[in-house]
Amino acid sequence: MSLATLPERGVLEVAGPDRVAFLQGLVSNDVSAARPGEAVWTALLTPQGKWLADFFVVPAGEVLLIDAERAQIPGLAQRLARFRLRSKVTLRDASAEWHVHAAWGGEAPDEGIVARDPRLPDAGWRVLAPAPLAGDATPEDYDRHRLTLGLPDGSKDMEAEKSVLLEAGFDELHGVSWSKGCYMGQELTARTRYRGLVKRRLVPVAVEGPLPPRGTPLTDPAGAEVGEMRSGRDGLGLALLRIGALDRGPFRAGETRLTPRIPAWMRLPAREEA
């Protein structure tokens, strides 16, 4: 088993008797499915259905712990607090009290609060502990692991108030509930699915050459722009690409060659020019 501490992650504590119902009306997934050993991966959207943040919800006794990007915790708490109204719920940045880890391969860790990463079986586990756990892997090792699987990583791969969940695989990766009822941004998310409006996808790519900076335009062999680079390292990356152009790869960013690697979990429509 590999275990890495993730210092760029923080924890927001949601407490109070209405904690589940409060989050249930705001985020994309079914918060009631979070139980001991089982995390829920979900997202907070704008009313227009655009991504603001995604995170794991991990139950811990009488509270819910939100495992999110550390830099997003203050803004996330502020946004959620706007909807508190009469709900019996409190929000508190608990990043100083909890350390976030990822584990993958082998058996589940036996220390800390351990919850399976619900996105893919090979994704591993999320582990929250009051002190950093001794591990044999680095955050960079985990980054390579999630890039190999094609998993998006928040603001590294999404754009606030612009990205649509289904472009980043939230449907296939169990980040959206289609049956739980209303939440903020639900209408656009549902319409995007049922009308087949997704024209671009966040796709894993093999990178030969220098890693292009995030946002670098990618072109097909004819020179037409087909998308842009997102995160990557060590010959692996994610790129936001037009679905209709995927068969025209490999793509270029200067002297760098990028070849799409469509993972087995990804469902794509029949290739049509997008």
Image (spheres, rainbow, N blue to C red):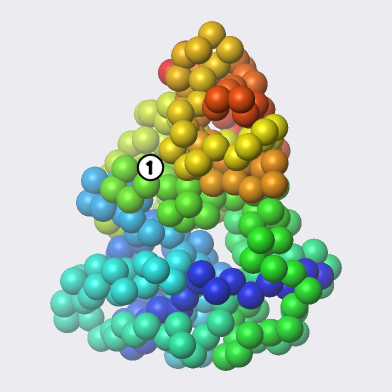
User: Which quadrant holds residue 212?
Assistant: top right
At 81% from the left and 70% from the top, the residue drawn is 1
Circle 1 residue = 164
In the shown orientation, is residue 24 left or right of residue 103? left
In the displayed structure, would residue 205 be above or below residue 139? above
Q: Nearer the viewer, residue 64 or 105?
A: 105
Q: Nearer the viewer, residue 224 or 118?
A: 224
Badge 1 density bin: few <14, some 14–19, many ≥20, Cα 10 Å: many
At 32% from the left and 69% from the top, the residue drawn is 76
Across and down, in percent, residue 103 comes to 71, 70
Across and down, in percent, residue 268 comes to 57, 29
In the shown orientation, is residue 32 left or right of residue 126? left
In the displayed structure, would residue 241 be above or below residue 189? above
Q: What quarter of the picture does the C terminus occupy?
A: top left
SS label for mark 1: loop
In the shown orientation, is residue 206 left or right of residue 45? right
- Residue type at tag 1: Val
In the displayed structure, would residue 223 be above or below residue 97? above
Across and down, in percent, residue 116 comes to 65, 69
At 46% from the left and 28% from the top, the residue drawn is 217
